[in-house]
């Protein structure tokens, strides 16, 4: 066992996705960067335990998992079981959360650390988290999350979305909080169902786009609204992105509508989203159609997976295993071909890194030393079995193993 955050300089004898099945390599690391990936040196001298050397035992190495849609500020992980007592609608869940979060002590640095520990234990090395911003909390949740993240000393990479869970325009004062968060350095501002929560889609979207244009922050908007109502709001976003030159700044979270449109309508919308660099995140909802992998890839619409809230006041579900979400997506999408399964693993790992503000990662020289070791034959096998993570290295530091 190593102490947390101990630096790793050499990971010996692992297999990388781009090598052959039996092709073992060593991964040399300096600081947070991979500096060499030579064939494994199996000589006796190399296997002697040296400080900073980690024996990979022939395990499969993948780039660290990227959780592109989390809510680490609101969970009851580590507390006694909390029974859900709210109604089943989005509005009912928002009310239930606001009624109970104070007695639970939410948001708390300690619980947020526990959630992060769960993510890390399952191989996540980078994330984008929404953090509630509302009239009750102000920006306190963001401070809590920053403090919890600081304990990882920069090994974990995280982006923060200031998230107006209780609405924007319907709660006068929230827009000013989002602006303050933008001025104080959050990466993105969030939004929430502009039509059904604020009942003013043009107003909310104009407001968010205005803040993005003025402060240079991204927009990551929760959009649960279905089919045409959802598509209409995506089009409102696209109109403004195109008009103001905000390409590459917007993420649509969930975006259930995209998978619910008629084929030709969906393709047209995806083509426009691809052109505008609008990205998506999905939590692979069990009872809804999944985002179509081939069509998103074909139109250049980058998407990534997220756990969403884990064991929170909306739902007791979730383990923090991002690979499990990727499995759910692949299974629910009936993906069986190797190319597709491999692509899903890429999206869950190195191809998702830009969602946390990092360059894409393939575990090649120059890539960030965000690495998860798994006892699996190949990426496809790792996805369909989701075996335990044997070691997790983030930013060149050994966090698990
Ligand atoms: Zn969410």
Image (tube, rainbow, N blue to C red):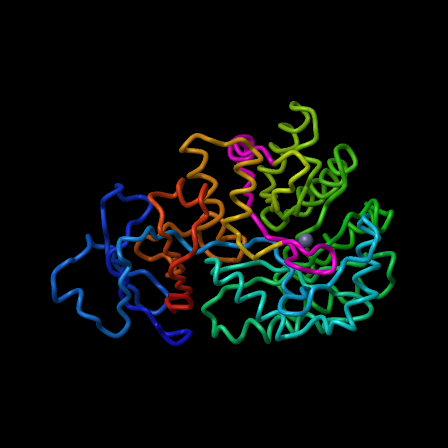
- Left or right relative to 231: residue 297: left
Q: Is residue 294 magenta?
A: yes
The vertical placement of 160 against 337, above or below, is below
The C terminus - image quarter: bottom left
Q: Looking at the figure, which quarter contains the N terminus?
A: bottom left
> Who is closer to the viewer here, 290 or 153?
290
Main SS of residues in magenta = loop
Q: Nearer the viewer, residue 42 or 228?
A: 42
**Front position in the image: 260 or 328:** 328
Query: Does the segment drawn in magenta span residue 73?
Result: no
Horizontal and vertical percent position of residue 205 = 77, 49
Q: Residue sitting at 33 percent across and 57 percent down?
A: 366
Q: Is residue 66 above or below residue 338?
A: below
Name which quarter of the figure residue 228 lies in.
top right
Can you tell which quarter of the image residue 365 is in?
A: bottom left
Image coordinates of residue 5 in percent, x first then y, are: 41, 73
- Which residue is depicted at the point 69% across and 60% down? 312
Q: Position of residue 246 (x, y in %)?
A: 63, 49
Question: Magenta residues, as a range?
Answer: 291-317
């Amino acid at each position: 066992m190593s102490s947390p955050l101990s630096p790793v300089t050499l990971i010996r004898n692992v297999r990388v996705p781009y090598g052959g099945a039996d092709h073992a390599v060593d991964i040399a690391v300096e600081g947070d960067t991979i500096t060499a990936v030579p064939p494994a040196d199996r000589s006796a001298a190399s296997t002697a335990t040296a400080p900073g050397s980690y024996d990979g035992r022939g395990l499969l190495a993948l780039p660290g998992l990227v959780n592109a849609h989390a809510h680490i500020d609101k969970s009851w992980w580590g507390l006694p079981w909390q029974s859900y007592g709210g109604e089943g609608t989005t509005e009912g869940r928002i009310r239930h959360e606001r009624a109970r979060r104070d007695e639970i002590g939410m948001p708390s640095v300690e619980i947020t650390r526990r959630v992060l520990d769960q993510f890390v234990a399952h191989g996540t090395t980078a994330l984008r988290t929404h953090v509630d911003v509302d009239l009750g909390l102000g920006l306190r949740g963001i401070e809590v999350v920053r403090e919890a993240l600081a304990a990882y000393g920069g090994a974990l990479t995280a982006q923060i979305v200031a998230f107006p869970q209780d609405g924007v325009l319907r709660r006068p004062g929230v827009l000013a909080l989002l602006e303050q968060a933008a001025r104080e350095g959050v990466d993105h501002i969030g939004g929430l169902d502009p039509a059904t929560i604020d009942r003013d889609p043009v107003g909310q979207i104009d407001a968010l786009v205005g803040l993005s244009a003025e402060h240079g922050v991204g927009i990551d908007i929760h959009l649960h609204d279905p089919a045409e109502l959802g598509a209409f709001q995506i089009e409102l976003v696209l109109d403004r992105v195109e008009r103001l030159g905000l390409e590459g700044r917007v993420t649509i979270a969930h975006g259930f509508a995209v998978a619910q449109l008629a084929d030709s309508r969906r393709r047209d919308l995806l083509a426009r989203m691809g052109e505008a660099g609008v990205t998506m995140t999905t939590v692979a909802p069990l009872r809804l159609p999944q985002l179509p992998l081939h069509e998103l890839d074909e139109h250049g619409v980058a998407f990534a997976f997220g756990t969403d809230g884990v064991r929170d006041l909306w739902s007791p579900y979730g383990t923090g295993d991002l690979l499990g979400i990727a499995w759910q997506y692949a299974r629910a999408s009936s993906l069986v071909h190797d190319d597709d399964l491999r692509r899903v693993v890429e999206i869950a790992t190195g191809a998702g890194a830009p969602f946390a503000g990092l360059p894409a990662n393939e575990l090649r020289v120059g890539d960030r030393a965000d690495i998860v070791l798994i006892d699996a034959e190949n990426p496809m096998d790792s996805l369909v079995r989701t075996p335990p993570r044997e070691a997790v290295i983030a930013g060149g530091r050994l966090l698990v193993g």
